[in-house]
Amino acid sequence: GQQLNQSPQSMFIQEGEDVSMNCTSSSIFNTWLWYKQDPGEGPVLLIALYKAGELTSNGRLTAQFGITRKDSFLNISASIPSDVGIYFCAGQEWSNDYKLSFGAGTTVTVRA
Amino acid sequence: DADVTQTPRNRITKTGKRIMLECSQTKGHDRMYWYRQDPGLGLRLIYYSFDVKDINKGEISDGYSVSRQAQAKFSLSLESAIPNQTALYFCATSPAGGDEQYFGPGTRLTVT
C-alpha cells in the first residue's frame, strides 16, 4: 500500500485548545480510519469513516471523510493532558485487497 | 482480558538467532496481520492471512516468515535476526469483509 501524507508531523498544544490534523493520498480511498497510540501500547481505533463527506464524532474527536475521497481530517476539541500520544490515519483503497495504508503519525504533546 | 495478545512484550536477542513472536486473539476474526513500526515511518505490513490456509506477503516480508496455526493464532519468525530488524512489532486482526483492524499491545524487539 501507499504511504499516506499526514500533517503536521508533531504539535505542541495548550490545554483547552482545539487542534486539527489531516491525511492525504494520491489514490481514492473507500475507508478512512483514525487511531491513537499511547506510549508502550498498540494503536487503538478512534473513528472509522466509510462515505465521502461523512462527519463522525467520538466524544471530543471529530473526523471527516473528504469529498474527493483522497483526504481525511481529525479534530480534537478542548484538549486535555490525556490527549498526548501519536495519532495515525489509515486508509483502504478499493483495489488493495483490504490492506490498509498508514500515515507516519502526528505526535501530540499538551502543555498543561 | 485483552482481545489481541502478543508474547513476548519485550525481547533482546543477538544477531543470527532465530526468534518467534506470537499473537493470539479472542475476537473471532478471520484476518490477521503483522506490522513493523519504526520511528517516523508509521506501520508497515510484513505478512497477512485471511484464513488458516491463506498467507500473503506484505510490503517488507524479506527476512521474515509466518505461520497461521489456527484461526486465533498467527506467529512471526525471524530466521536469522539482524540489527536493522530492531523495531516494534504489532499484530492486528479484522473481521472478514471489514476494514477496521484491531491491534495487539506490541513486542519491542532489540537485535544486538
Image: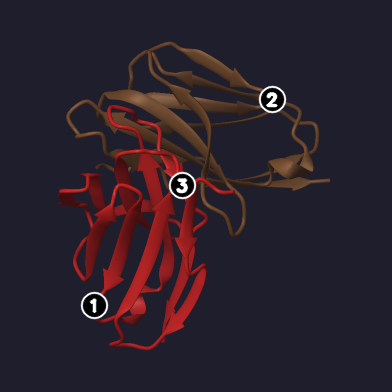
Chain colours: A brown, B red
Between residue B71 and residue A18, name the one nearer to us. Answer: B71
> Which residue is at 21% across, 71% downward?
B63
From the top left corner, tell me how far across and down residue A30 is, in percent.
30, 22
Whether labels 3 and 1 belong to a single chain: the reply is: yes
Circle 2 residues within 10 Å: few <14, some 14–19, many ≥20:
few
Amino acid carrying label 1: it is: Glu
Between residue B108 and residue A26, name the one nearer to us. Answer: B108
Total count of labels: 3
Q: Which residue in the protein does label 1 denote?
A: B79
Amino acid carrying label 2: it is: Arg
Q: Which residue in the protein does label 3 denote?
A: B103
Pointer 2 with pointer 3, Cβ within 8 A: no
Residue lying at the far right of the rendered structure: A112
Amino acid carrying label 3: it is: Phe
Position of B15 relative to A61 (above/below): below
Nearer the N terminus, badge 3 or badge 1? 1
Position of A7 relative to B13 (above/below): above
Q: Quadrant of residue A75?
A: top right
Q: Which residue in the protein does label 2 denote?
A: A60
Position of B106 relative to B27 (above/below): below
Circle 3 residues within 10 Å: few <14, some 14–19, many ≥20:
many
